[in-house]
Amino acid sequence: MHGMFHTSLPPDQDRLLSLFHEIQNSRTETNDIPPEDVREIARYMNLSVAEVYGVLSFYHLFSVTPRGRYVVRLCDSLSCRVAGSVDIYSYLCGQLGLKRGGTTDDGMFTLELVNCLGSCDTAPNMMVNNQLVGNLSIPKVDDYFGRLMKEAGK
Amino acid sequence: MVSITIDGKHVEVEEGTRILAAAEQAGIQIPTLCHHEDLTPEGTCGMCIVRIEGDPAYRRACMTPVREGMNIRTHTTELRKIRRGLLELVLAAHPDDCLQCIRHGNCELQDLAERYELRSLRYDQYTRGLPVDVTARGIVRDMNKCIGCGRCVQVCEELQSVRAISFYGRGSDTIVSPGTDTDMGSSVCVNCGQCVAYCPVGALHEKEQIDDVWRAIEDRDTLVAAQIAPAVRVALGEEFGMKPGDLVIGKIYAALRRMGVDTVFDTNFSADLTIMEEGTEFLELVEKGGPFPLITSCSPGWIKFGETYFPELTGHISSCKSPQQMMGSLIKTYYAESRGLDPEKIVSLSIMPCTAKKFEACRPEMRDSGYQDVDYVLTTRELARMIRQAGIDFDALQDEPADPMMSAYSGAATIFGATGGVMEAALRTAYELKTGDRLDQIEFHPVRGLSGIKEAVIDVKGLPVKVAIAHGLSNARVLLDKVSAAKKKGESPYHFIEIMACRGGCIGGGGQPIDNSMRKRAERIRGLYREDMELPIRRSHENPEVQAIYEDFLGTPGSEKAHHLLHTVYTKRNPYSEAG
Amino acid sequence: MKVKVQSEYIRRFAESEPSLEGYEKLGGYKGLKTAIQRSPGDVRQEVVDSGLRGRGGAGFPTGKKWESVPADERHKETILVCNADEGEPGTFKDRYLMEHIPFLVLEGLTIAAYALQAGRMYIYIRGEYPEVYEGLQRAARAARERNYLGEHILGSDFSIDLEVRIGGGSYVVGDETALLNSLMGKRGYPWMKPPFPTEKGAWGVPTVVNNVETLACLPVILSEGAERFARIGAPESPGPKLFCVSGAVQNPGIFEFPMGVSVGDVIEAAGGTKGSLKAVQIGGTAGPVYTDAALSYKLDYESMKKRGGVLGSGALVIMDSKTNMAGVLEIIMRFFSEESCGQCFPCRYGTRQLAYMARRIACGQGRSSYLPLMVETTEIMDAASFCPFGQSVSLPLRSLFEGFGDEIERFIREQEYVKEVV
């Protein structure tokens, strides 16, 4: 399979992370950077395949394997814990039928635990794709995910 | 010069010297794990930390340059405790299977554990539980054993510029990998094995074929015919306590026979043959006026590198096979016919300093005899293991000769194992064939030595022949970038180029005894040039067995039969495709 | 000196809907206008005189860092990077500044660029702030239109434009050399200093890395003078500081105080503890965890250092009696293990063993031998780590054992289980 992506970013190594974001964000159903794209990035940037994987694998926002349409990143750092993030996590695991890192069968949600999202005054926090959602409570979680499901027609 | 004090001892060292080297000069061995004298220190392991008076921090001896008046302590009680604890941390993350490991007895981690007498670990042990990558022909990658020193990445990226592997992941999960969807076999890895040469543990090692060879030897039905590369004869002794550069070829022939090998030939014979074929090829180009350059083709690591990164230059690579492959096809034709043997019952074995030769033997086009021309390739290290397994006391062996027909060789052949050796051998013959004159000075010193890129203009009776030699693939890349750029302008800065994938030449191959440092390689090279000087015949075209094979079998150099059996083709490879 | 009044040095510019017009009305861009009329050397001297210290966590004097850029030809290529990789748990002041007062940050950055006569200017923002990234791009566009950025700034000879680069998720990249490697598109490994980035930084060129909050102090230093700045706060830690308060408090948020304010006063500003105060971690995950004795501690670089602690990012995470300290140990050790870059042995192996032991303690499977072993592990990391990351684990660990050792030992003895461990 041949990787295909369009970018206006120049083929300079210092644009690599930006290119990763661009490709991943454009793949709205799977939020990933598949192997064929990695090869194409290597060719485009005149880097070796190993080098591109090396950079990609260092940064935890990127994934080489397909994820869900919505990547849910729940903060698991101290402030959020103190504010009760674990209850939200347990609830989400139960509702989605997932464990950490898993993706729902319908390809809608991937649940990840991450470290501090930098909004500790609105703890507990999560990010859903590129959106920060703070002041989480179980009702708020129900409401938020309910809306997402409705938008997806499910 | 700079005066410092180390552990109470005063030493004078050159400015810019790192503490590690300064300590060595003072007779003090600071422990290291990630450091190697041939590589740029990266400060990964932290074992070499020392205390400097007036400095609150601990400093890495491998990276810190000395300064006038420094007062250094290298082995305080505290430092010993820290290093011991650090070693425990590393060992707790390392598999506990020394007895089954290929590097048992020759492992830098074992050495340190022994040095610190680590009889128990306070940390709980864990391993990564990753599958071992056996997809490459020459090299096995076992990431359960990787300690993360980074030597292999530095070697592959900087010394070889192949860039087949990089660090992958983050934190304690970091391994070395060609990529997620790629294993070594489908990557751009050229199997040069320089990563193996520098790996301190058993994370990267040769793909062994010892069991296959024992089976072939023990099979009464088959006849095993072996060939031995030039670089092996000045290095195998190291596995038995001898010095690098000691010539042990007579013992090798004897050992192989004791092991049960039926016929013992010598790759140096086919090296002489290669010179005949390649020299002829070169002189034909000279007649036609090009196209230049002609590039040597006996280094399979270089060949895959060229096919991958310089596909536009593959037309300039000599069509000659390597000596290993020439010998392989001749064993199953020339030899088989002359003895009335069924080639299907012949097992063609080669003993090589090289891991890439395992890949070369399996190239689909290497079947001109009608069978796989070379069945098994054993590295120098594997042969040493087999000799030990056979209970042979190598040191006590009496020298024996090889079997006639394809074992006589000239000094020109034996120097193939050194960088510049193929070029020198080719020049000795090409000069005399072209001019009809006999050279009084047959040693071509400008092509010798360890400079990464060597250039010379050889005066062949008024005809200036511009040659270049590169060893180590990053040097090859520099040279070939120049050639490629010139080619675009329709020019060629050189007539003849020799490229060896490994620094120093084949004597530094991925299959050679470890410690495979440049220091050892230099000694091995000296051994080969010594042998050359002592041999009665020093020119390939004067090898009587070579003359015989043309007369009896091949006809003339470059004949149709010679082309069929002794020449080959190359494949352009895409570094970004899944096939690698 | 007890100071209860929050300061307004920085916060007076804050608007919930940031606009360039609004910012100018509140006095914005006066600093840049002042700076550009003076010589770069004068501007640098002003910053030296102010005593401003880096607000990212290390507290290195900013003027001194600028002065270490070589004065020769090379300084023309100087790169200025704003470190917006705010990853220290408990810290959200840089997000606050970039979201609510982006022009203050841009102005400060441009002043710095002018003072250094920089050739290139970047903001490196963490990958978890994509909305902030978009906001910064918008602000830069507005600034360009008004000639506060780009060619011939405010009609002067000085031109510089801004590139905003976004990270991929990695805490260690907040370290300046790791950040520069990431900026260059590589794995976020720190490199060994010397050479210092100001001598040889990104692409081998002199590079200055400054934190968002540090740069945000520059506009007022320039428009109102170094002396005004230096008079606020503590003698060796002048100026105002944005303290991030989170955890078990009534009103978590950002509170601006002069340096030297007491922990108790900051917590009070945040509405006080919810429940009773059990512990407070100061400076981020790499900072010490104190008992309520910390209420009287002064929050400035020197005072914290004298206590064997750090001010760090100025984050305060408050824990109440519901918090389980064995659980806190597990969270902190796991953080370091997940974020270790893996380059050096002491840290990659040490953080993993620490996280493992902390987890076993929290899961009721701890052994008493773990405690001294964990301390010894951090000693190894203190001595042999390649960079400050590995050396910063011992502080929270030791402080937890000192302040809450009894609780943790009881956990081990009674094989108690922290129910929140996931």
Image (cartoon, coloured by chain):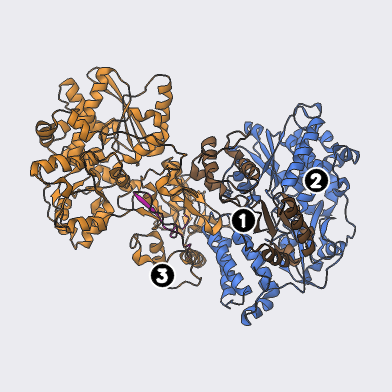
Residue lying at 59% horizontally and 44% vertically, measured from the top left: C181
Q: Is residue B58 left or right of residue B491?
A: right
Q: Is residue C302 above or below residue B427?
A: below
Q: Do labels 1 and 3 share a chain?
A: no
Parent chain of label 3: B
Residue B115 placement: quadrant: bottom left
Circle 3 sits on which residue? B117
Can you name the residue that lies furthest to the bottom here?
C414
Question: Which amino acid, mark 3?
Answer: Glu
Residue C138 location in percent, x, y?
A: 77, 38
> Could you tell me which chain the residue with mark 1 belongs to?
C
Disc 2: which residue: C217
Q: The brown chain is which one?
A: A
Any idea which chain is the orange one in this picture?
Answer: B
**SS for dot 3:** loop
Q: Is residue B94 magenta?
A: no
Give me the residue at 79% from left, 47% from top: C99
User: How far is the residue under mark 2 from the one under mark 1?
Assistant: 26 Å
Residue at image mark 1: C388
Name chain C's colour: blue
Cα–Cα span, label 1 and label 3: 30 Å
For the residue pair B389 and B508, the one nearer the viewer reads as B389
The residue at 45%/38% (across/down) is B575
State the image coordinates of residue C133 (x, y, percent, origin top left). 73, 43
Say whether residue B139 is magenta. yes
The local crowd at label 1, few if under 14, some if 14 to 19, many if 20 or more residues have their Cα within 10 Å, is few
| Number of numbered tags placed on the structure image | 3
In the image, residue B143 above or below residue B307: below
